[in-house]
Amino acid sequence: MDIKIFETTEKLDQYAAELFTELIIKKPNAVLGLATGSTPIGIYAKIVENHNNNKVSFSGVTTYNLDEYVGLTPDNDQSYAYYMNKHLFSHIDIPAIQTHLPDGMAEDPQTECARYEAMITARPADIQLLGLGHNGHIGFNEPDENLSGATHVVKLKEETREANARFFASMDEVPTEAFTMGVGSILKANTILLVVRGSDKARIVKEALTGPITTQVPASLLQTHPRVIVLLDQEAGRMLS
Ligand code: F6R
């Protein structure tokens, strides 16, 4: 694992955005695995800046997002489809047809999982961006005795719903289920880019990166991947020696 700790959020975002930009310059038809949440917002802003400065075109790029809530339409401002349009897709020259998220409104969730997994398997990501949950989740793969390898529907834990409730008008509106890539789907990526910020995640960063590999800390399975880059701010990295 290649672990880098940054003095400022600005530098972290810039570094992460450069990784994506350089990849796309080298490989214009790159496949990007993308994430939502608060962690990537600054990174997406820097990627957009690079695009606006004519450094990079996304016309040949394909993207796959990690996850989507079950039951939210893409025009619902809490859906991950909405988030991706707001923070990235609407600001760059990527054709909509080349951007993919699980369909939160799919009539048959199992068929949707199989469809999504087949796409990821056919074209694994060159780089997969990940944030980290306080309980060690990646995507919506929550700590459990067993983890699903492939794309699946998860029942969200209360702690995860509570962590996300800040984005909804009330707790009742927070969805109870989500589609997520499985840990196996995530590990198919050529390179994994894990980004974590904040003192409140210092303990789980240490557990995930240096603790035992266990399904109780889903991110610890990243230790089995040959190419993982971890970008941390000083607060998130404070418990690493
Ligand atoms: C988002 C996702 C989640 C988040 C994680 C951290 O697509 O899959 O695993 O990356 O919950 O969220 P933030 O960045 O909001 O702290």
Image (spheres, grey):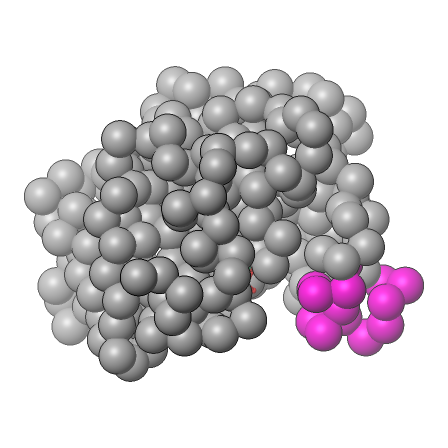
In this rendering, the answer to whether 104 lies above or below 80 is: above
Q: Nearer the viewer, residue 131 or 220?
A: 220
Horizontal arrangement in the rendering, residue 95 relative to residue 212 (left or right): left
Q: Nearer the viewer, residue 43 or 160?
A: 160
In this rendering, the answer to whether 135 lies above or below 29 is: below
Image quarter for ligand 1 equals: bottom right
**Residue at 17% across / 42% down in the picture?**
28
- The range drawn in magenta is 161-173
Image location of residue 179, percent across then percent down? 66, 38
In this rendering, the answer to whether 134 lies above or below 171 is: above
Horizontal arrangement in the rendering, residue 115 relative to residue 152 (left or right): left
Horizontal arrangement in the rendering, residue 62 relative to residue 150 (left or right): left
**Residue at 42% across / 20% down in the picture?**
121
Residue at the limit of the structure toward the right, as seen here? 172
Main secondary structure type of the part rendered in magenta:
helix
Horizontal arrangement in the rendering, residue 49 relative to residue 71 (left or right): left
Image location of residue 143, percent across then percent down? 66, 40
**Residue at 26% across / 31% down in the picture?**
226
Does the magenta-highlighted stretch encompass residue 74? no
Count of picture labels: 0
Does the magenta-highlighted stretch encompass residue 169? yes
Image location of residue 63, percent across then percent down? 39, 42
Quadrant that contains the C terminus? bottom left
Image location of residue 46, percent across then percent down? 28, 71
Residue at the limit of the structure toward the left, as seen here? 26
